[in-house]
Image (cartoon, grey):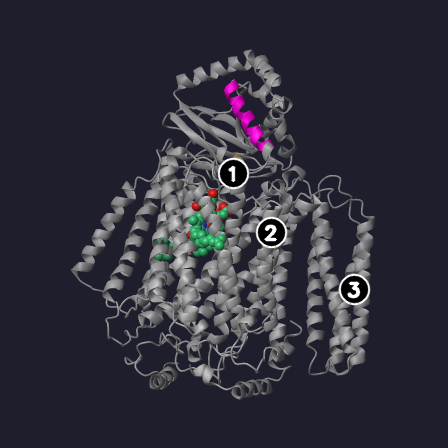
Amino acid sequence: MQGSALNESQIALNYHKNTETTTPHGAHHDHRLFGLVLFLIAESAIFLGLFTAFLIYRSVLPVWPPEGTPELELLLPGINTIILISSSFVMHKGQDAIKKNDVKGLQLWFAITAIMGAIFLVGQLYEYFHLEFGLKTNLFASAFYVLTGFHGLHVTFGLLLILAVLLRSRKKDHYSQESFFGVEAAELYWHFVDVVWIVLFTLVYLL
Amino acid sequence: MNIPSNIITLIIGIALTLISLWYGQNHGLLPVAASEEAAQVDGIFNFMMTIATGLFLLIEGVLIYSIFKFRKRPGDRTDGPAIEGNVPLEILWTAIPTVIVLVLSIYSFEVYNNMGGLDPMASHDMGHKMAHQSTDLPSSEPVALALNSDNQKIALGLGASPGEQSQEPPLQVNVNAIQYAWIFTYPDTGIVSGELHVPVGQPVQLNISAGDVLHAFWVPQLRIKQDAIPGRDAQLTFTATRDGKYPVICAELCGAYHGGMKTFLYVQTPDEYNQWQQDNTLAQNDDLDKAVAVNSANLSDGEYLAPYAQEMGIDSNALEQLHAQHHLMVSNQ
Amino acid sequence: MTTSAQTIAHTKPSEHKQRKWQDYFTFNTDHKVIGIQYFVASFLFFFIGGAFAEVMRTELATPDPDFVSPEFYNQLLTMHGTTMIFLWIVPAGAAFANFLIPLMIGAEDMAFPRLNAVAFWMFPIGGILLMSSFFVGAPQAGWTSYPPLSLVAGKWGEEIWILSLLIAGTSSILGAINFLTTILRMRMPDMDLHSMPLFCWAMMATSILILLSTPVLAAALILLSFDLLAGTSFFNPTGGGDPVVYQHMFWFYSHPAVYIMILPFFGVISEILPVHSRKPIFGYRAIAYSSLAICFLGLIVWAHHMFTSGTPGWLRMFFMAATMLIAVPTGIKVFSWCATIWGGKLSLNTPMLFAIGFLSSFLIGGLTGVMVASVPFDIHVHDTYFVVGHFHYVLFGGSAFSLFAGFYHWFPKMTGRMINETLGKLHFALTFIGLNLTFMPMHELGLLGMNRRVALYDVSFQPLNVLSTVGAYVMAVSTLPFVINVLWSLFKGEKAGRNPWHALTLEWQTSSPPIIENFEEEPILWSGPYDYGIDTEAEEEEETVAQILAEVGSESR
Ligand code: HEA
Ligand code: HEA
Ligand code: CUA
Ligand SMILES: [Cu+2]
């Protein structure tokens, strides 16, 4: 068995060689972003599944939304939408900042994004409590709550990511010009949640 | 590839073709065909069996031949020839299956169209039929409203065959599937029955609905099947050509006694059929009270069954059956 | 994912050069450990799922529901289907992928080792959760769980079914992310896509399918869950919903799922045949691309499971044609495999026997698959034993045979020990006979009129059913030599060197079992993965040949 003839120091050596050649934030950094993109593709497929179901109901049912569904209020969700979309731009400024090694800037912009995200969620909850229909009222109502709720969960998760970045950025030199995967990941995720919302808003509120 | 290119190949090829052709016609795997549609389906199955037998023999033959011919001899430690591909051959075995599946698709399309699968007219009358039926059977009321059938452009299932559309209007039978029974209503005569009786040679249109969960109407000898979907209408059209008694089977899992959800299709001569029709119309009127009386006297859950019994006016036998099944269902819940 | 930069540091237990047995019971991030964990866990579930099948077959030996109650029968069949698919075949595919991908492409581990371990541990958790449903009344609406039945037959069993599938699904999504990233981003410098072993191509196609389709199942299950627990009516007609929407969403996943269950094993076969035939694979590119073609076509044929359901006529026609087209890329593979064997020097050892067994029985399943794709015919046989026959031929005759082939083939690599050939051949013979005896009569049963998922059937079907039951018992017996063989060889088997089969893919260049970070030194791409027969003395002296091959290889590329 040639393999076991190998002594430990060789393996150790082998290991060191590898860590030295691949800088921890070089190659692996790339993999992680790649992996995240794949993950987001899978996530889109869930939303696509839900949206398609929604569209099928829309096209199969004679009256949509079913009779007796109160009109959806557009003002609040509209404002909410604008807030969410603009938060994406605000967030991007955060990444710009860290690219210039400006941790303070990162913190500032991300904090603003977090607040905007929180406003969105509160707005959503407010809407839930003031709607005239409940989860079980009819198919449209159920679809409305499940779609927005599932999206809301994603916003919540994105918010947690942002908070995690903020927390970590307090550690000295955690993020820098060269190394800011966490920032990138959180931002990519947030953009994703944003795009999903745009589609969802169009489907549920506008169509 | 050193294909043994000589007479042997030719002989093998011919033998293979002949065997396939013969077996494709003589496999004897199918039950009797009791309708024209069934005969067409058998045609396509035989065709597929022919192709499948050929491919089966070819590939299994290659495998068995290789096992014996190309087995590594003891002591031989060399590799085989380094052949990495052969483009013409690869094109050939891409092209042939492509052609086969295209032919098969077209043939299937033909048959399906002949069976009435693409009849777009069928859906129009269906909406009304449904309305009619839901008044017949209280159990189907809540669900029948779910989807507006007028909204569906195309019927689910099989409509009239293209050639048949102008012929006599088919005999209408409404089929309602519930756990675990079939209820057939003849809208023209008002007969409600647990069995399906149709005259031989006349087109029949079944309007299929479900009262609770999914079921599927299947008569193997007719080769036709359609799911009964709560909230949706479906139909099957067929013309039986051979009289006899054939099983009606529920083919979609619908609960513990799915396997017991069976009844019979009686394909009868016009005389027999008329006789049956008369008997039942009479029974419907005369025995109504009796049936219900038996029902409420002996049965604890008569209340549940009463509406069915009333409409079905069925002979006590069928009632018993239904009741037994209902019991199973209840004890099962 | 965010932490995988650090995981590299964790996967470096440079203190010991071989894994200890305890490692296999822990949260270990070594892809080889994870691969073996997947194997062992999935085989445990295979025995459980097989035991369910044996009870079902015993019940079906007689027409009456006398051995188990019809209700329990339905629970068994649901659990049997779910277990075999989600807890055996799919994870076994992941087992091969985990063990082999990094070795085959010369990487030292997966791209995200820790994510990998998370993905693994979700699977037994989901599995145990599923089994626990027996305590509350197992799900009984079939592995397809069509509403409305699934909404009315036992609430908690159904909910547990949903949850465990969500867990298993997430696990397979995480796995797919890992496989795809590893294959695309971590190949050793000399290896381009077209000098990658075909197994990696197959896993690429599989992972794409998983990423695109599994989430849709999740969406369906979430909606089903709402219907079940919160009383909404997405799929419940009483409240205005539509059960057919569920069927579309379910099959949008579950049809690709059948290719998720076969593609990795197509890959396995492409690895095994050249090695034991001593011939290059015939038509490398055709086989590689046909995996992608199957992947694409697999995504657009789902409604062939709904030909008798709520699918309008013209849609049935579209799905029929698309489905039949899959015969073309699959045929390319089958013919190429036959051509690989043809003219080779076959060693008929256990892995090779299973591989040939795969070819011969998958063919039968494939041919019946094309038959059921024909709408008019499927209208007759849908939901009958004909379909049951079809899918056991592709699943057992296909996936499972090639699983066994791969298991025997890489057993020396995984354990460093050779398998006992006699027991292996006995296992093959019994399984092959059992398979055909069990599942061949089912076709005839279906044609004659026996519907599936029934505990009671017409007396006239009894003789064929008895035959089938006997076959099932033979298959049960066949697992005995298998288990004995594995246990015996693990401890007493002949020592296997690095490369007992004289194979050319990279995993055989390292020791058996491979050391912790796979290769002592940077592996070198001596030759293409299947360059057999370039030098006829190939098996005589490995070292010199390897050098020759390297030269030839660099020329030919
Ligand atoms: C590993 C799993 C697997 C695989 C690989 C396949 C492969 C195929 N399957 Fe199967 N299938 C299942 C698993 C699988 N299936 C399962 C589990 C079900 C039932 C689910 C349930 O209801 O519970 C099912 C059900 C199922 C149905 C629904 C039947 C019904 O419920 O009524 C259909 C219909 O079209 C179908 C078709 C096909 C086709 C066309 C292929 C093709 O991919 C086959 C292609 C292969 C070949 C054709 C052989 C080799 C090719 C050649 C030698 C070339 C020349 C050939 C020709 C020209 C024909 N399958
Ligand atoms: C990979 C998938 C796979 C595999 C390998 C199998 C393997 C087997 N299956 Fe199948 N089966 C399915 C997937 C699979 N199945 C699916 C998806 C369904 C559809 C479910 C549904 O309708 O919802 C189904 C349905 C199904 C039915 C139809 C049920 C019905 O419709 O009523 C039948 C009937 O005979 C059956 C039988 C068998 C048999 C005899 C085996 C044999 O090959 C099993 C052999 C294995 C063993 C015998 C294990 C041996 C071990 C022991 C016996 C030891 C036990 C020891 C301990 C527990 C410690 N299966
Ligand atoms: Cu009704 Cu099965
Ligand atoms: Cu399919």
Left or right of A155 on screen, residue C552: left
Dot 2 crowding, Cα within 10 Å, few <14, some 14–19, many 20+? some
Q: Is residue C506 magenta?
A: no
Q: Which mark is residue C70?
A: 1
Q: Quadrant of residue C378?
A: top left
Q: Quadrant of the C terminus of chain B?
A: top right
Q: Chain of mark 1?
A: C
Query: Between marks 3 and 2, how big is the CA–CA gap?
Result: 40 Å
Q: Are marks 3 and 2 on the same chain?
A: no
Closer to the camera, A71 or C534? C534
- Depth check, mark 1 against mark 3: the one in front is 1
Q: Kindly identify which chain the residue marked by label 3 belongs to.
A: A
Element under disc 1? helix
Q: Is residue C318 visible?
A: no
Residue B60 in sight from this viewpoint: yes
* Residue A157, numbered circle: none
Q: Look at the picture and state if C39 lies above or below C459.
A: below
* Residue that label 2 marks: C132
The residue that disc 3 covers is A117
Name which residue lies at 49% across and 72% down.
C101
Q: Are marks 3 and 2 in contact (CB under 8 Å)?
A: no
Q: Magenta stretch mostly in which secondary structure?
A: helix
Q: Is residue B326 above or below residue B41?
A: above
Which range is magenta?
B316-330
Task: In the rendered view, tell whether residue B184 sits above or below residue C153.
Answer: above
Specify which label sits upstream in the sequence, 2 or 1: 1
Mark 2: secondary structure: helix
Badge 2: chain ID: C
Find residue B78 and report its horizontal and vertical position in percent: 27, 77
Where residue B93 sits in the image (x, y, percent)?
Answer: 33, 61
